[in-house]
Image (cartoon, rainbow, N blue to C red):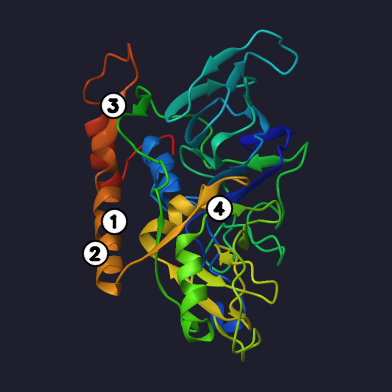
Amino acid sequence: MRPALRVLAPGLLTTIQDLGRPGYQRLGVPVGGALDPVSLRAANALVGNAVDTGALEIAYVGPTLAVDADDVRLSLVGASTTVEILPGENASRATRIETMRSIRLRRGQVVRIGSLSGGAVLYVAVEGGFDIEPELGSQSTYLRGALGGWQGRPLQADDRVPLVRMRASERDDCRYHGLDLKPPARFRVIAGPQSDYFSNGAIARFFDSTYTVCAGSDRMGMRLDGARLDHPCGFNITSDAIAPGSIQVPGNGQPIVLLADRQTTGGYPKIATVISADLPALGRVAIGAKISFEPVSIETAEAARRSMFAEIARLGDKIVPLAGSGDAFAPQLLHHNLVSGVVDALY
C-alpha cells in the first residue's frame, strides 16, 4: 500500500499549496500558491525539503490526520494552535506539542490540529512531500477552477493523500528560534494604477483609517470594512491586469485586497498595491483583525523585497535542535542540505 496521510477530519479548509503556477495568467489561470509563502518555505526547511515543495495549508481550524506509512516527519509553521499526538485513532490520551517545529510520527499515530490563533493559516510540510502529479507545473490547489492539489478541492474525511516517502530519514527533530511572523504595524503600499480615480480626500482617508478584515474574505481576496472611499470618476473601468496585493474599490466604497487566487483581470479602480515584502504577512492576517496602510516609494518597496529574500536565505540559521535532541549539528546540516540536496537510499 502506498504511504499516505489519511484524513480523519478535514478541518475548515485544508488544501495543498506550493509557490504557485506562474506563467498562465494570459490564459486566465491565476498564480495561486500559499497565502503565506514565507511560512511555507520555513515549514519545508524544517524537514529538509526544497522550498517550493507542496505542503498542507490549514485555514482557521485544523484537520485530524492518521499516519499510513512506516513513519513520517512533519513540520508545523505559522499560526499558534493546540497540536495533539495520539497513539491511535481510538486513543483518548494525547501528547501536546507546540508549532514551529518538526516531529517524527510512526504508523497508526494520529495528529490532531485545533483552532488557529494569532493568524489565519498554518503550514504542515511532510519530509519528501506529497506524491501528487503537478498540474501546469504546480501542486497548488486552485479551488474555483478545481485545479491541482488533491483532486482540485479541499481535503475531505477518508481521503488518503499519498506521500513520496515510506520512511523518514534518521535525524533529530528541530525547531525555529527567533523566527518572527508578527504582522507589521501598518502594511506598506505603493500608489495603484487608478489612484487618480479617487479624490485627495479619499486617499487621505484611506491612509488615516483602520479597517477590519471581514468574514467574506478568502484566498481570492481580503474584504475590508471601514471608511468608505468614493469614486468621483466612477467605479467602472476597462478591465486590466491584477497584480498581487492590488487594492480595488468596488461601488460600495469598501476596499478589497487581492490575494493568491485573485482573478487575472478586474474592472474596479485600484487605489493602491500592497508591496510584495508585506504580502506574506498579510496572507496570515485573520478575519476580525484590524489593519491599516502607509504609502512608500517604489525604491523602498524594492529594497524591502531584497531584504525579505535575504531573510528567507537565512532561515536555516534559525533552526535549532529540540530540547534534549543531543545533535548540535542538525541545524547546520539542514541548512546546507537546502542548498546541495539530500541523498538518502530510502527516498
Disc 2 on helix, strand or loop?
A: helix
Looking at the rendering, which quadrant does residue 322 occupy? top left
Who comes first in sequence, dot 2 or dot 4? 4
The answer for how far apart the CA atoms under marks 4 and 1 are is 20 Å
The answer for how far apart the CA atoms under marks 3 and 2 are is 29 Å
Q: Nearer the viewer, mark 2 or mark 4?
A: 2
Residue drawn at point x = 50 percent, y = 44 percent = 129
Label 4–label 1 contact, CB within 8 A: no
Amino acid type at mark 2: Ala
Amino acid type at mark 1: Phe
Who comes first in sequence, dot 3 or dot 4? 4
**Residue matched to label 4:** 17
On the rendered structure, is 7 left or right of 77? Answer: right
> What number is the disc on residue 309?
1
Compared with 320, 53 (above or below) is below
Who comes first in sequence, dot 2 or dot 1? 2
Q: Nearer the viewer, mark 4 or mark 1?
A: 1
Looking at the rendering, which quadrant does residue 264 occupy? bottom right
Nearer to the camera, 54 or 68: 54
Compared with 112, 305 (above or below) is below
